[in-house]
Amino acid sequence: MFPETQFSASFSSSSSHPKPPPIPILPIPTSQQLSWQFSEMAMFIHFGPNTFTDSEWGTGRADSSVFNPTALNASQWVRVAKENGFSRIILTAKHHDGFCLWPSEYTDYSVKSSPWKNGNGDVVFELAEAARNAGVQLGLYLSPWDRHEPTYGKTLEYNEYYMGQMTELLTRYGNIKEVWLDGAKGEGEKDMEYLFDNWFSLIHQLQPEAVIFSDAGPDIRWVGNENGVAGTTCWSCFNRSAAKIGDTDTKYSHVGDPYGHDWVPAECDVSIRPGWFWHASQVPKSAMTLLDLYYKSVGRNGLLLLNVPPNSSGLISDEDIQVLREFSELRNSIFSHNLAKNALPSASSTRGGLCDSQFGSHRVLEEGIHAYWAPNGNQSDWALYLNFQEPVTFNVLQVQEPIHMGQRVMEFHLDVMNEKGDWKKVINGTTVGYQRLLLFPNVQSSRIRLVIDKSRADPLISYLGIYIDPYSNLGNIYGTSSKSYFKSSQVLR
Ligand code: FUL
């Protein structure tokens, strides 16, 4: 397989018009799903009576008087999110204990019966305002399982109650970008039929820009674990009909489905601490652990939803902020400089021929997914080459597909040319999707190529990046271990 040259390239017909883009392969994302995917990382905020009672699944019997944060500041939550690369923030407006962080008309079990601000406070309002001012997107979690509400278990009454609360949340607080719900429920709890179709239609009607997350979509799916890790193969294609909220086949959710008819990408939720709610006895994960999770979620075509629970004073704790800063510094230090930036790209073929600049290989060095390289049709060999003037050393590969055209790549590998002029395989991958990051021992070369071995349709590649990550210690390709620059929670100091 050789890159095309002026002589081998097939030119488009005599027409003076440029070749149009290829046909997208279905399913493709909606504009709301694309906007969700571009946000890459969201911050989850678990906050409520559990924060004060040292519990995770509140019984719904804790007195409202326990909810009394002394220094709640939603602007601090938003600032921490924004400064550290989270463009979306999702709040537990109501968790399983049924306590509402906004003054719902349909229950007294809420902030209005708490001592906080003498019952005049509204956490959802404060967060919505802070997020709007900072340009951070807002999402809300309204737990279906409600251990306080007496109508829970009665189909009509509770569904009316839930939809009434949903309507309050989606009509009072401006633009909501994500509605989060799940099928979580303790064993032996009351049976309950949720009228999901009615809920989903209402949500989309009231907030047309929102995506709905649950174990089974409809818009965004749970990745199948609470460790923040997507499958090494991770399709955004999925069959909604094969998944059921509260009774998911987690293996199916983890990997997705190359034959799926629906576009339902994976969201990877995980907490910075062992629990979802804040507990005085728990400490945050290290920045290196978060970096590892980043590779395994954002780097596997998912969105990382990282929970950072405020403490009982109503603020995100200093030690969590410190870790988030270090995590952010690590990402900036690795990813702010694409070593491929000045390389000379070429390809096995170009849609419309070499003279067609719209789909040329140089497109893979333009940021974003809208410009992309496309091969000529009816090819069986697909490869992108990067030539460097000097040998480069790297250990991270980034590949992106223009997912608005559908997810295509099924298998690929990266080769580097050695000193003898032979291609040597560095790493294999399966799916790419919005973004694939692969970490491997250091390699050095002045010629590399990305080969697409299998694809659902002509593969399209929108971005190629190579980077050096000196912190994740994998050694180099010659087997000697590279120097570790990092000690737990002491990054870049
Ligand atoms: C689960 C809940 O049961 C946990 O408490 C937490 O909210 C997690 C994000 O979702 O389903």
Image (cartoon, rainbow, N blue to C red):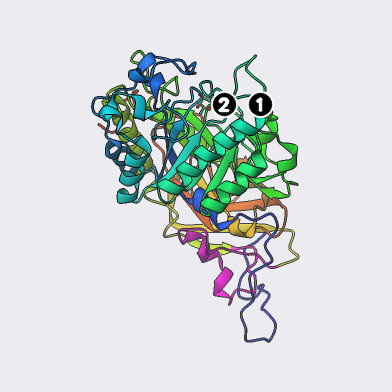
Is residue 43 a member of the stretch shown in magenta? no
The answer to whether mark 2 and mark 1 are in CB contact below 8 A is yes
Residue 101 percent location from the top left of the image: 39, 32
Q: What residue sits 51% from the left and 32% below the top?
A: 269
> Which residue shows up at 67% across the image and 79% down it?
12
Q: Quadrant of the C terminus?
A: top left
Q: Nearer the viewer, residue 312 or 108?
A: 108
Beta carbon at label 2 within 8 Å of ligand 1: yes
Identify whether 300 is placed above or below 311.
below
Cα separation, mark 2 vs mark 1, equals: 9 Å
Front one among 105 and 193: 105
How far from the left and from the top, in percent, is residue 87?
Answer: 40, 46
Please provide the residue range marked out in magenta.
Answer: 347-376
Name the kind of residue labelled 1 in the image.
Met
Q: Main secondary structure of the magenta part?
A: loop
Q: Disc 1 designates what residue?
A: 192
* Mark 1 surroundings: few (<14), some (14-19) or many (≥20) residues within 10 A: some
The disc, 2 or 1, on the residue closer to the chain's N-terminal end is 2
Asked if residue 374 is among those painted magenta in the image, a careful observer would answer yes
* Residue closer to the observer: 243 or 94: 94
Q: Residues within 10 Å of mark 2 (few under 14, many from 20)?
A: many
Query: Residue under circle 2?
Result: 145
Quarter holding the N terminus? bottom right
Tell me if I can see residue 448 in this picture.
no
Residue 244 on image: x %, y %: 70, 34
